[in-house]
Image (cartoon, rainbow, N blue to C red):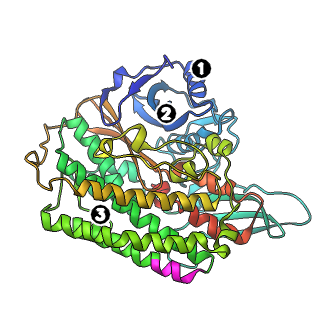
Amino acid sequence: MDNFLQLTPAVPVKRSAIPVLRLPEFRQALLDCAGDDGYVVHFFGYPEQEKLSILAVMRRDNRLLAARCQVPEAYASLAAEDGKFQLFERELAEQFGVQPLGHPWLKSVRYHPNWTGREDVFGNDYSKDIPGSYPYYQVQGDEIHEVAVGPVHAGIIEPGHFRFQCMGEKVLHLEIQLGFQHRDAERLIVNSPARRAPFLLESVAGDTAVANSVCHSQAMEALTGTVVNERDKRIRTIAMELERLANHTGDLGALAGDVAFAPVAAYFGRIRGEFLNLLMALSGNRFGKGLVRPGRVLTTWNPAQVAGILDKITELKPQIEEVSNLLFSAHTVLSRFDNCGIVSRDTAAAIGLVGFAGRASGLDHDVRKAFPTEAYPSLSCPKPSCTGGDVFARAWIRHEEILHSLFCIQKLLEKDPDPPDSEPGVHSGRPAADSVVVTLQEAWRGELSHAVLTGEDGRVIRYKIKDPSFHNWTGLALAMRNQGISDFPLNNKSFNLSYCGFDL
């Protein structure tokens, strides 16, 4: 790994410090790093000296490693040898018109013309307003039939298209196409005033508003030399854990609903509302918007507020344990959860699965343990006890994370709510020039990362967001191999991936 620069999360480095490799050397170094249990954290393009450069940030052995390379209009695809790169390369092709030669599954990601004005590498004709008009993969055979679902769904969920290739009730292949609500969020952040960025970042994915806000704030704090006090770090950590609690309890309720266990579904739904109300009490918004800003949190923090949150957490814990026991002891539930939608450890590692879904398949990675920031250095990390890779494992890991989040919040609330160092941080001025900073948090779905690059005047020239769903949608597709098509809602809820966090 001598070709890389080791990064520390939320610590900026000069762009000139990141090694520039020749394309063959760059390609081989990335493939070597990604092999076995290496992961791609970032792989994206940005303009540099009137040319296109790629910045790659890899994760291996709990280290962040960075390298860069200037690329021509076409290059030999890395995804042809390692599937972890396939979606990153498709995104690069769509944004900059660079063609990965030999890519095994080259198709558009979010349906937009590339930013350079080059000819579209996918063959899409954007003048006809028919996005993604490429041929879907088809299984051939007399008994094969297709089932197409979406992008408009019979509910209020976001748009996505699911194309099932089936033989009878068995799904042989699922192709997932997203991008129907592409907002060009990354360029919007770059081209907007800095004071608007926090509002944009907490709207990237509404159910991950707090974690995205923390990643953004850490990046801006690092670039401006702002030091955040321990009280505000505790509040930010509590808010992220409340966000985790709200989503995990809501999804356990949704899983119960998908197997027609209505009492548990209703009970978990009510508990989810309790955690959203705690975020409301903390921030003034049920999704935690408006709470986290670079250098500070926008909330009061007094003994009465601490006591109220602590009392509610204490009240909810036995209720959660009771309703979880109902869910995981019912034979009707277990008969649907067990051995449904298995993603093996080898498969999960091959596609770079992250978060609770990865841990449910036996991948031992958690940002809170590998790269702890905020108040996480003082907290333990949950240890998954079930790694079967099926719906049951993904649900059980959520249950364990709920109990761990309750413990973390209780521990953090025991400390002085207003210690002497609680003055808000102060920005030192414009962000550092010609710099790069990468931030990571274990959002409730998994590894969330922001990468920010600045130019010679300190202005942001590239803002890259990597939602955990960017890795995990492929996991859902593979979980459906050889499953009954009626098991799709159950598998879908067990991952509960983000459309808007992917579409950006």
Location of residue 122 with respect to 25 vertically, above or below: below
Residue 157 vertical position relative to residue 27 in the rendered view, above or below: below
Residue drawn at 32 percent across, 41 percent down: 377
Which residue in the protein does label 1 denote?
A: 24
Real-space Cα separation, disc 1 to disc 3, in angstroms = 45 Å
Image quarter (top left, top right, bottom left or bottom right) of the C terminus: bottom left
What secondary structure is found at the residue carrying circle 3? Answer: loop
Given residues 106 and 382, the one toward you in this image is: 382
- Which dot, 1 or 3, sits closer to the camera? 3
Residue at 90 percent across and 60 percent down: it is: 141
How packed mark 3 is, by other alpha carbons closer than 10 Å (few <14, some 14-19, many 20 or more), is many
Q: Amino acid at mark 3?
A: Gly
Q: Which residue is mark 2?
A: 59
Mark closest to the chain's N terminus, 1 or 2: 1
What's under tag 1, amino acid-wise?
Answer: Pro
Which label is found at residue 288? 3
The amino acid at mark 2 is Arg
Q: Position of residue 212 (x, y in %)?
A: 35, 52
Query: Which label lies toward us, 1 or 2?
Result: 2
